[in-house]
Amino acid sequence: VAGYFLIAARDLPTFNFNPADPGTATFPDTMGGALLACSLALAAIGIFRIRTGFGNTPVTITEPLNVTGAIVVTLIYVLAMPYVTYYAATVVWVPLLLLLGGVRSWKWLLSLTVLTLLFAYFIFELLLNVNLP
Amino acid sequence: MLMLQDFIGGLDLVLKANALTALLIGTVIGYIVGAIPGLTSSIALAVIIPFTFHMSPVPAIVLMVSIYMASEYAGAIPAILANAPGTPAAAPTAFDGYPMRLKGEAGKALTLSILGSGFGALIGTLLLVFTAVSIVKIAIIFGPPEYFSLAVLGLSLVGVLSSSFVLKGFIGLLFGLLLATIGLDPISGNARFAITDDFLSGIPLLPALIGLFALSEVFFMLETIHHKVPEMKEIPRLSMSFGLFRGMKIHLLRSAVIGYVIGVVPGAGATIAAMTSYAEAKRASKDPETYGTGNPRGVVASETANNAAVAGAMAPLLTLGIPGSASTAIMIGGLLIQGIQPGPMLFVDRPTFPYSIFAAMLLGLPVMVALGLFGVRLWVKVTLIPVGALATAITAICILGAYTNENGMYPVWVMVGLGVAGYLMRKVDIHPAPIVLALVLATMMETNFRRALMGTGGDPRIFVTSPISACMLVLAILVVVVPALHNFKRRRASFSKASARTDP
């Protein structure tokens, strides 16, 4: 992230109406440089910890399939929404996410899907005047 | 006299049907959120803000404040009944609350926690009313250098306090500051890092908040789908008995003051307040060994402090425009959407508005205590909702809320992108609070930095020649350097010990 901002900041305009203004690129440059320094320091500490084994706590995801599945399903849902409409996409997405969340009861699957659709229609479309895709 | 007039004006605004309805709804939502382990006030606020778009400012802020306060109240309920704190700030409550339940004193523990919370919130709110005006009197003379230094100090505190590892806190901060530079430069109007036209308007604050707090939490919730909250066989009986507090006057007052003072410090928040108050109560006690085994004073120390901290966190938000906690950072987003810029000028331009918040906090107290005492049967049931169902409902509201921000898909993508990024960053102990606070404070920091330089022909000495600015910068440096050195020494000592143990 720091590298991207530092490189992209090279293309920012350098002209200033007020010569005392440090310019458009100063702030992102400074923050990008600082982030790069902090990240390198953290990487160095990480390498030290891996080598010595001291204070090295591995990162674990308890339910990797469920979490990854939820991320993928949600990304596909957001991607599909403008093409198949909000309601059609939601009818598929809610039960899938519930299943990934360990809910097996058909009562929960059905009721939460219906409730989500009704909630979106009555609260967002009718009450808040939101035009859902 | 003027303060009293403003307070009456604020009270008048809150005593309207829409504000009172918002107070009641907010309190109920806050209780539900607080009673569910894993859900916090920041998640609830991030999810609720889209619903405030069409509300007028006073009911909107009353709704947000009552959610914030009630969720801190309710965090104690699952902490006592199931040893599963509803909010992180209720963790010390479980130390003694759960052993009390095991001894058959659940009703007493819940009564103490609810009344202690009410007392903490009352003292915190009174302290807020009286200290806010004094802070405003100082802040009103602030110019660009002071505001820049204030933002630096606020961010330093947040960076240091948000993570056990200072470097990770700062990585979060800098990530947030960089994200905030996307869009139009606030001084020159030049476009920065806008890969598509959507990015010209910058990273929208509200979807970013929803993603970082609520959606990232959903992924965490999915990791706990097999954790079961033990079901309560019998519902405890609660009563409005102040006799339980006999001999605790000093204890209550000390906890409330500790909570308020820590709440004022940006980044510290209710969790640190509750932990500190609990530790202080134990240290000052004649029988410290009873703490952790079901001592009612432990419950009172934690609950009084974490609720007083809520009022404390409101002080820098309203008087300086600096959020004291993750929840108040989200509330800034909600206020900005309403066209209200928190800070000292709010007390000058719209003095009744901040007083309406104080009035709402005081009016909300009896409502919260009554709901806590008489709604316990419902709050116990709330803890039993399946995690998967909660996660799905929250995600659905997150997506709808983000879409509402601009009636388009760009904010939804920002929300989902930052939700996934927030989850991955939290896995490596980089908390979203500094990212959000940086997003809120970045514009204030950059514009005041550049304005200060432009005002002096580019002379950076302005930041150290102004005494207030210099003091804040020195404090910011100390805040970072002292704990970093302390941590470094501690880690080096434990590394030397470990090496000595492994060497033959």
Image: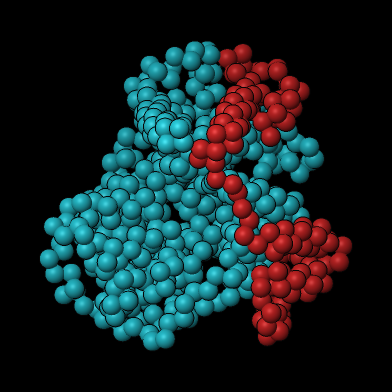
Decide: is B165 above or below B106.
above
Tell me the residue at 68%/41% (across/down).
B202
Give whichever of B44, B204 is nearer the camera: B44
User: How many labels were placed on the picture?
Assistant: 0
- Residue B495 at x, y percent in the picture: 44, 33
Tell me what hue chain A is rendered in. red
Dividing the picture into quarters, in which one does residue B252 lie? Answer: bottom left
Decide: is B108 above or below B151.
below
**Any part of residue B335 in sight:** no
Quadrant assignment for the C terminus of chain B: top left
Dividing the picture into quarters, in which one does residue B222 lie? Answer: bottom right
Dividing the picture into quarters, in which one does residue B88 lie? Answer: bottom left
Tell me what hue chain B is rendered in. cyan
- Residue B288 at x, y percent in the picture: 20, 57
Give whichever of B341, B40 is nearer the camera: B40
Give whichever of B242, B89 is nearer the camera: B89
Tell me the residue at 54%/41% (across/down).
A56
Decide: is B69 above or below B417.
below
Question: Would residue B186 be found to the left or right of residue B147 on screen?
Answer: right
Tell me the residue at 36%/43% (across/down).
B265
- Residue A90 at x, y percent in the picture: 76, 70
